[in-house]
């Protein structure tokens, strides 16, 4: 148990709150604050109605009917000369009170049911889910009318009914939110460290699910307000002359042709309240997303790394420039998986990023796009694109994604949503960047499909992802990445999932697109054949560091790092019939076990004590090439290995 806990310790249990608290994140959203203020004003006004309403809401003044706004009646009067402002303030009690009641009923049922069923799993889960399915199939409106009939038009009964019936759908949503969080690595880690289920629930699972709960609650409140006012519009609920928002709209609608003004404040207050609830939900969702993907604390940016490399693989006027990039996972991002990586990419250049699985290639690519998932954070360093710093600047990132940097992920098929046609996903991407009409976007989508050499673009556009082949899907993904006309394409093992002939076609395609558009490509791969055919320069990564960089010919013919040499020697493309392929003995050390000195030393035939003593810096290993090896001289005279 101890050992297990120690092993996962570095992975486990992120800080309960990151430095950006939820409230702080929400308070940075002006629209959400405005929505919140509007809602607070409406609620406080309704509560304080007896104190602030200028008139009695049911007192009629037959001398002053259907008036427009004036100093005497700020929002005018209705058909019986009653003050509209006072009636709206009083009406808020029933309308907002009804919404609050329905929301409370929904939460009281849905939260415990959702959490319990997510946690219990197994048979309990199945039984509860079946009940939920049955309740969800009940038509809410009809049952609500039945409740109104039984309980003598009581709006309270109607709102309780709405809350009860809606709780089924929401229990389902909350169950998914809890389930999703339960599957996160840090929750399993917390379990392994011996925390009790209740502690895990309150400390790790629920904070992550709060966002979902709040968003869904505000959306449900907006929907309920619609039902509530709709029912009072239909003259259910409190009988006249009691003021209700829906009833007031009904009154206004009768004289809409002759006195349109009356409709403005009555309809307006419902519209404003609904909009405020929706916008608040949006704000909460964004704030919650930021809380758990907070990119970086800026002060960390200026921390000095342990050993900065004095030479880095640079180019004269880079498009992308990565400096001292470190990435951590787990509690306080304490487990470093990418360590002070620096490199540049020039406009129009194709650069390979090579290394065994687990060396940090994907994580590096994701960090450039600001897409580190889970507990991943950039803990140090800078990433500039076209001179613009991306680290810690969500706005710069958002502006860069897609139109500056395109991304083709490691898993092509799963990056298409199975529930939408290829066409709608592609057109969505085009419209996001071009802000054009659907027809124009469709034409461009067809051009893009033609550009990636799809022969029947019309048919593919109409297909669902499961109806097209893997190679086709990969082309669609590339087409989608090209929709924003990116100047840099990051392609993470774009051909790994494809068979050999399709691989070759996709690579040719990437090269053609590159030549036609002049975009740069960062091509992540572990295939030397791909590097040799496609790239002009390559970076070799090992255990979170760049260990060698050079022009492709230099790298393939004269590797200057024992790791590169060993990788090349174990390359199946160079294999000869009848000979066993040499493999690199041992495995890549996991980030928790990186040694102090050279990380490859344990597997290196040339390693000496000096290699293990201290961190090895990148050194110049010839014109425009670097290596993280102090035994280059021995490597050059050593005849074993190299490209066969
Ligand atoms: P590559 O793409 O080179 O195969 P990755 O970038 O996927 O390697 O992974 C680099 C390291 O980061 C690995 O040690 C991996 O275990 C770790 N890692 C990647 N994603 C996560 C994650 N979500 N949580 C914790 N560790 C991760
Ligand atoms: Mg990878």
Image (cartoon, rainbow, N blue to C red):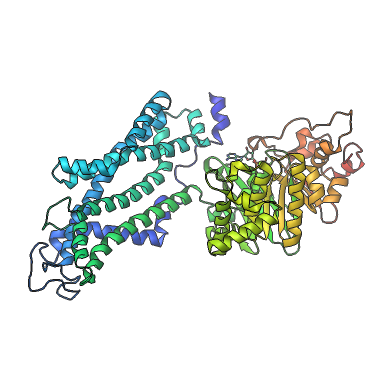
Question: Can I make out residue 458 in this image?
Answer: yes
Q: How many marks?
A: 0
At horizontal 38% and vertical 57% (from top left) the residue drawn is 279
In this rendering, would 536 be left or right of 15?
right
Decide: is 548 above or below 389.
Answer: above
x then y, percent, for residue 627: 79, 48
Locate residue 30: give its quadrant. Answer: bottom left
Q: Is residue 313 above or below residue 101?
A: below
Q: Pinpoint residue 71: horizontal percent, then vertical percent.
A: 17, 76
Q: Residue at x 58, y 50 (%)?
A: 462
Q: Quadrant of ligand 2?
A: top right
**Seen in the image, is 564 located left or right of residue 75?**
right
- Does 498 appear above or below 192? below
Q: Quadrant of the C terminus?
A: top right
In this image, 470 relative to 201: left or right? right
- The quadrant holding residue 47 is bottom left
* Residue 611: x %, y % from top left: 78, 39
**Horizontal side, residue 165 vs residue 189: left or right:** left
Residue at (44%, 45%) from the top-left corner? 17
Where residue 573 appears, x then y in whole percent?
83, 38
Work out whether residue 329 or residue 364 is closer to the camera in this orientation and state it: 364
The one nearer the camera, 293 or 221, is 221
Foreground residue among 337 and 475: 475
Does residue 107 appear in the picture of this structure?
no
Q: Residue furthest bottom?
A: 71
């Amino acid at each position: 148990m101890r050992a297990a806990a120690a092993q996962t310790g570095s992975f486990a249990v992120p800080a309960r709150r990151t430095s950006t608290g939820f409230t702080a994140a929400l308070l940075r959203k002006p629209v959400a604050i405005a929505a919140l203020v509007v809602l607070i004003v409406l609620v406080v006004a309704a509560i304080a109605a007896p104190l602030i309403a200028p008139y009695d809401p049911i007192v009629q003044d037959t001398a002053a009917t259907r008036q427009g706004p004036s100093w005497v009646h700020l929002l005018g009067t209705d058909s019986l000369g009653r003050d509209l402002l006072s009636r709206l303030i009083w009406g808020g009690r029933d309308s907002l009170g009804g919404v609050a009641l329905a929301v409370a009923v929904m939460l009281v049922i849905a939260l415990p049911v959702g959490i319990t069923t997510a946690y219990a799993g197994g048979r309990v889960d199945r039984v509860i889910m079946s009940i939920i399915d049955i309740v969800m199939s009940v038509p809410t409106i009809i049952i609500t009318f039945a409740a109104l009939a039984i309980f003598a038009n009581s709006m309270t009964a109607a709102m309780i009914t709405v809350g009860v019936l809606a709780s089924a759908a929401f229990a389902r949503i909350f169950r998914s939110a809890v389930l999703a969080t339960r599957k996160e690595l840090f929750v399993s880690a917390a379990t392994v460290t011996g925390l009790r289920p209740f502690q895990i629930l309150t400390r790790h699972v629920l904070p992550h699910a709060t966002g979902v709960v709040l968003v869904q609650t505000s959306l449900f409140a907006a929907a309920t307000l619609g039902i509530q006012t709709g029912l009072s519009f239909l003259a259910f609920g409190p009988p006249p002359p009691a003021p209700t928002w829906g009833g007031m709209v009904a009154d206004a609608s009768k004289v809409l042709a002759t006195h349109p003004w009356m409709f403005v404040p009555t309809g307006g207050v419902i519209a404003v309240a609904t909009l405020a609830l929706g916008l608040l939900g949006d704000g909460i969702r964004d704030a919650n997303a930021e809380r758990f993907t907070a990119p970086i604390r800026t002060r960390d940016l200026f921390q000095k790394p342990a050993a900065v490399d004095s030479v880095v693989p640079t180019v004269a006027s880079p498009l992308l420039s990565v400096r001292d990039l470190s990435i951590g996972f787990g509690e306080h991002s304490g487990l470093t998986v990418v360590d002070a990586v620096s490199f540049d990419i020039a406009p129009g250049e194709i650069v390979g990023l090579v290394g065994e699985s687990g060396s940090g290639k994907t994580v590096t690519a994701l960090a450039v796009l600001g897409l580190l998932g889970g507990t991943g954070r950039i803990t140090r360093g800078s990433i500039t694109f076209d001179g613009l710093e991306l680290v810690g600047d969500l706005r710069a990132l958002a502006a860069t994604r897609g139109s500056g940097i395109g991304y083709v992920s490691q898993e092509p098929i799963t990056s298409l949503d199975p529930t939408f046609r290829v066409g709608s996903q592609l057109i969505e991407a085009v419209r996001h960047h071009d802000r054009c009409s659907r027809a124009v976007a469709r034409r461009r989508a067809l051009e893009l499909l033609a550009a990636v050499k799809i022969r029947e673009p019309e048919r593919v556009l109409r297909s669902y992802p499961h109806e097209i082949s893997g190679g086709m899907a990969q082309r669609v993904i590339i087409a989608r990445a090209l929709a924003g006309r990116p100047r840099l394409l990051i392609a993470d093992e774009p051909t790994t999932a494809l068979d050999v002939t399709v691989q070759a076609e996709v690579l040719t395609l990437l090269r053609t697109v590159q030549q036609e558009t002049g975009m740069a490509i960062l091509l992540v791969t572990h295939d030397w054949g791909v590097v040799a055919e496609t790239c002009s320069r390559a970076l070799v990564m090992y255990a979170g560091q760049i260990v060698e960089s050079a022009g492709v010919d230099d790298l393939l013919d004269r590797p200057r790092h024992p790791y590169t040499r060993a990788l090349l020697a174990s390359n199946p493309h160079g294999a000869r019939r009848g000979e066993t392929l040499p493999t690199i003995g041992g495995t890549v050390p996991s980030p928790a076990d990186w040694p102090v000195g050279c990380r490859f030393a344990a597997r290196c035939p040339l390693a000496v004590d000096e290699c293990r003593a201290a961190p090895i810096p990148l050194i110049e290993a010839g014109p425009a090439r670097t290596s993280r090896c102090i035994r280059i001289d021995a490597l050059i005279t050593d005849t074993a290995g190299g490209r066969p």
